[in-house]
Amino acid sequence: MFEKILIANRGEIALRIHRACRELGIQTVAVHSTADADAMHVRLADESVCIGPPPARQSYLNVAALLTAADITGADAIHPGVGFLSESADFAAMVQEHGFTWIGPSPEHIRIMGDKITAKQAVMKLGIPTVPGSAESLTDDEEAVSLANEIGYPVLVKATGGGGGKGMKIARNEAELRAALPLARSEAKAFFNNDAVFLEKFLERPRHIELQILGDGQGHVVHLGERDCSLQRRHQKLLEEAPSPALNAAARQEIGDIAVKAMLDFGYASAGTLEFLYEDGKFYFIEMNTRLQVEHPVTEWITGIDLVREQIKIAAGAALSFRQEDIRLHGHAIEVRINAENPDTFAPSPGLITDYHAPGGPGVRVDSGLFSGYRVPSHYDSLVSKLIVHGATRNECLMRLRRALEEYVISGIETTIPLHRRLIQSPDFLNGDYDIHWLERLMEDDRTRV
Ligand code: ADP
């Protein structure tokens, strides 16, 4: 097992990884920008290294500074967390070339899955169902138009290198498609430095259902059930639950069997997530995330498996200590993402936390680096806390979530807590009856009513 791990991240996810390390008896090294010198992930770590000024490009994305920090502290391994360099195949390869262990899948697997086209081609070969559309990048508009006629409108123009819900355009007819293609290409070039785009059928009312996978690269792969992440705004997740209210045991087993077999053939080692859209009882692969997910705690709670601990053990060469038949799903878990944002306009709201009280009691987990007197910097992602609740049933879980959201006090900045308090009162949400476009329809209704 490792003696010391460098955590190449910040905020709640750096803390989360620190906690798993401490429980395994592993020392931790935190890295931080000058804006994060007082952050909780720095305070709790055994050692810390300042890796640069506030802009992420000069600190959390600064490969030379990260490798130097690992070197001078004598770390054995690097955990990238989520975001930043966690899906950089180049960084993973460099970590290995410098003699550190990379806590994640092989650079080769990261590379294949990091590009939406090569990912789609790979999973099609592995027998995973995908969304109807092209499996190659479209350079010719006429070719795109004839493909759209074949699969039927509406279609989605997607950037091959896209991520974080960015780089997608809907076209409802040929004129819209002809207008969207050049726009999508130039945006993709500007955002992702890759102007390749492809076409997919736009699904009107799907749910976003993703499957958590663990593989050890030694002939064992298991799935830990699904997460339903259909509550989204601008293709970004706001709330996640497990199990999905829309899936029964037979559907879970069907997609689980397909995914496990595919990942075995692929030789996948580490934690990973296969993301699907689910409509009319059918699954359509959209992408694979070759890393930990922000919403991993809901899976941890219903399975009792610590995903970060498993990632670390697998990277250290251990085989999985359980089999598919050992995995049981218990109760229901929901995570809400609490962002430092105005709850109506979603404008960022960094600043000083003047008062802080986290909820507690049975079935409540808070993953957050916040405390009273902490200043939320303006340079990074606005996610400041994850509130996760568990109950024996979905109803119990919902009542608990309502109670926990009532207790939660974060003063001095605006957060999305009021939005969550409102959303979980909605009858559609209470019934589990929502799809990926539901929140936007609801907010549109609110606006027309005002
Ligand atoms: P990203 O890498 O940016 O997260 P994804 O391909 O994972 O992109 O898609 C993100 C979200 O966009 C999905 O959760 C879903 O809400 C929406 N989306 C993606 N593909 C489609 C599609 N074919 N039809 C409808 N919505 C889609």
Image (cartoon, helix red, strand yellow):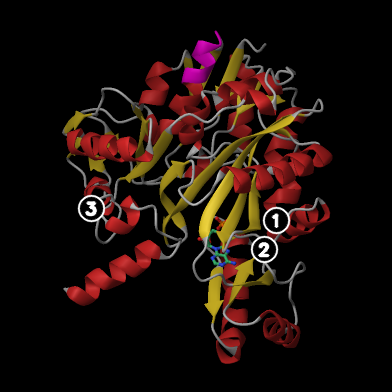
Say the numbered circle drawn on residue 160.
Answer: 2
Q: Do the residues labelled 2 and 1 touch (CB within 8 Å)?
A: yes
Q: For residue 164, say whether it is visible.
A: no
Amino acid type indicated by mark 3:
Arg
Q: In terms of secondary structure, where does tag 3 sit?
A: helix
Q: Along the polypeptide, which appears first: circle 2 or circle 1?
A: 1
Q: How far apart in space, not on screen, are marks 1 and 3 (Cα)?
A: 37 Å
Toward the viewer: 246 or 151?
Answer: 246
Q: Is mark 3 within 8 Å of ligand 1?
A: no
Alpha-carbon neighbours of circle 2 within 10 Å: few (<14), some, or many (≥20)? many
Could you tell me residue 194's position as x and y percent? 67, 64
Q: Do the residues labelled 3 and 2 touch (CB within 8 Å)?
A: no
Q: Along the polypeptide, which appears first: circle 3 or circle 2?
A: 2
Picture mark count: 3
Q: Are marks 1 and 3 in contact (CB under 8 Å)?
A: no
Quadrant in the picture for residue 326: top right
Q: Name the residue under label 3.
A: 422
Residue at image coords 45%, 61%: 435
Amino acid type indicated by mark 2:
Thr
Q: Along the polypeptide, which appears first: circle 1 or circle 3?
A: 1
Q: What stretch is highlighted in magenta?
A: 19-25
Q: Name the residue under label 1.
A: 115
